[in-house]
Image (tube, rainbow, N blue to C red):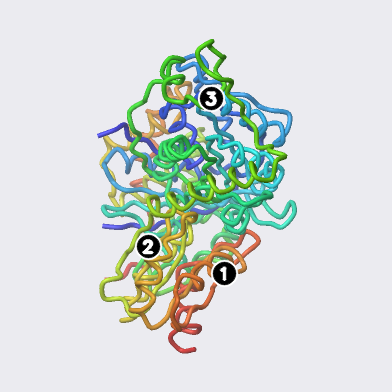
Amino acid sequence: MGELRLMKGNEAVAEAAVRAGCDGYFGYPITPQSEIMEYLMAVKPYETTGMVVLQAESETASINMLYGGAGTGKMVMTSSSSPGISLMQEGISYMAGAELPALIVNVVRGGPGLGTIQPSQADYFQAVKGGGHGDYKMIVLAPASVQEMADFAKLGFDLAFKYRTPVMILSDGAIGQMMEKVELFDPIPRRTDAELIAQCPWAATGKPKEREHVIITSLDLDPAGQERVNLKLQAKYRQIEKDEVRYELIGCDDAEYLFIAFGLSARICQKSMDLARAKSIKVGLLRPITLYPFPEKQVAEIAKKVKGILVVEMNAGQMIEDVRLSAGCSVKIEHYGRFGGIIPAPDEVVRALEKQIIGG
Amino acid sequence: MTEEIIIAGFGGQGVLSMGKILAYSGVMQNKEVSWMPSYGPEMRGGTANVTVIVSDERISSPILNAFDTAIILNQQSMDKFEKSVKPGGLLIYDPNGITTHPSRKDINIYSIEAADEAGKLGLSKVFNMIVLGGFLKLKPLVAPENIHKGLEKSLPARHHKMIPDNENAIEIGKGLLKPLNVLN
């Protein structure tokens, strides 16, 4: 069993990044995720593993430092919260285009604009549909616990390098700020330069005589060349959609109704399930863990078996669009959301289920 | 066993750290725990509250609308959380500064004059541990040795010399409860 600690989600993702062998963190403070950099500055991994921890001058600088670090094959990450992530979108698009692996943590707060520092899930569209320009996708992991904040740092780096793509952990202010028991995995040493060169032949690591230049770019002015880049990216995305869908089903075997929710909302829905089942309402939960790739087949399969689906999100209705596209049948699908930093309570979710799905 | 607790009072009363010590003691006892603070504007000078869940099972929602226990340390929190205690549940409060005392008949209510006692001891910082002692007397969720470990883990090393005072305060708190409404 790994080391047990009581940690905030923000601390857990930071500690796990160090343990995963991360080479560099570049970020700029913003509530509610500033503990990530504070934690890294406190544990000083630059004195132990040699990992760089740098406060950049802005979010725009952070994401471009990530581009540079990732271009040399280094395992790099940044973190921010909603307005800061908006500033990074150009860089994320460039990284997707140049096929660069990196981990980006968004501890979402309420928007739009500067919004609020309280938790929200209103950045679903931005994360899943491509907040930057061009035809790209980013693997999006949605942790629902502090444990998953730690586990997904490791998983995020693994997927980023497996597919040479930016990966986002889409968390929220509550998961970032709350403390839970975490079992930490044993530290993995940072890769040596020799290991990096062997594992990342695409990286700009210095040109030996025996091989061609490695060029890291997202620019190809020849339309035919740029179409080839796009076709390659799309093939990669189809592979990701085939192999990397992750989800959790809870209490679905006998379910007549269904909640679909991710992250913190999924945790709330588990309590709502208990409250509803105490009233003999048989409701289950489907929790997408990867928001991209979205568990389309699983939604389609379970939609045929239930009488109605309530999609619960801390936004005005974003994931529900993917649920409706996936369901492919006439089952009733409604949305219940709170926004601007308000978190729905378990009992109000049950009332929404009764009103919008069962009674409606 | 699942115990869902709200601890609520003014910022600076040690509400969040009381919750953290309880949660860390739970980890040391191999329980599942969740510690969910109110933060942001509420933390800056106004009321502070934290939801702590200690359970033998995987914890569902860290956000709750009803609690097994409410530990209430100011009037605003009384106004907000007395009604959120589950029927048959427990409310513990320090009467210091309370103008409208709890009146529900379907829950167990105890008062604990912790601020007064901390003043007498000349140790205002252990106020929250006196309250925690009262709670643990009624709901012994964690063993004393795990509270010791929880204190060690929660307090920065420079404050470890305060651990005996904290443990002593917990013991004092266990003897300070006054039953006001006790269900059969």
Q: Position of residue B106 (x, y in %)?
A: 38, 74
A75 vs B105, nearest the viewer = A75
Q: Disc 1 marks which residue?
A: A337
> Considering the numbered disc 2 on the image, is that residue within a helix, a strand or a loop?
strand
Pointer 1 chain: A
Q: Earlier in the sequence, mark 3 or mark 1?
A: 3
On screen, residue A280 versus residue A289, left or right, reads left
The N terminus of chain B, quarter of image: bottom left
Q: Give a yes or no on whether discs 3 and 1 share a subunit.
A: yes
Q: Give a yes or no on whether discs 2 and 1 share a subunit.
A: no
On screen, residue A176 versus residue A288, left or right, reads right
Compared with residue A63, is residue A142 higher up or lower down, i.e. above or below? below
CA distance separating discs 3 and 1: 43 Å
> Considering the numbered disc 3 on the image, is that residue within a helix, a strand or a loop?
loop
Pointer 3 chain: A
CA distance separating discs 2 and 1: 27 Å
Q: Residues within 10 Å of mark 3 (few under 14, many from 20)?
A: many
A229 vs B49, nearest the viewer = A229
Q: Disc 3 marks which residue?
A: A203
The C terminus of chain B, quarter of image: bottom left
Q: Position of residue B181 (x, y in %)?
A: 38, 68
In front: label 2 or label 1 = 1
> Considering the numbered disc 1 on the image, is that residue within a helix, a strand or a loop?
strand
Compared with residue A9, is residue A277 higher up or lower down, i.e. above or below? below
Tell me which amino acid carries mark 3. Answer: Ala
A237 vs A56, nearest the viewer = A237
Q: Residues within 10 Å of mark 2 (few under 14, many from 20)?
A: some
Q: Residue at x 52, y 40 (%)?
A: A165
Q: Position of residue A21 (x, y in %)?
A: 43, 25
Q: Disc 2 marks which residue?
A: B68
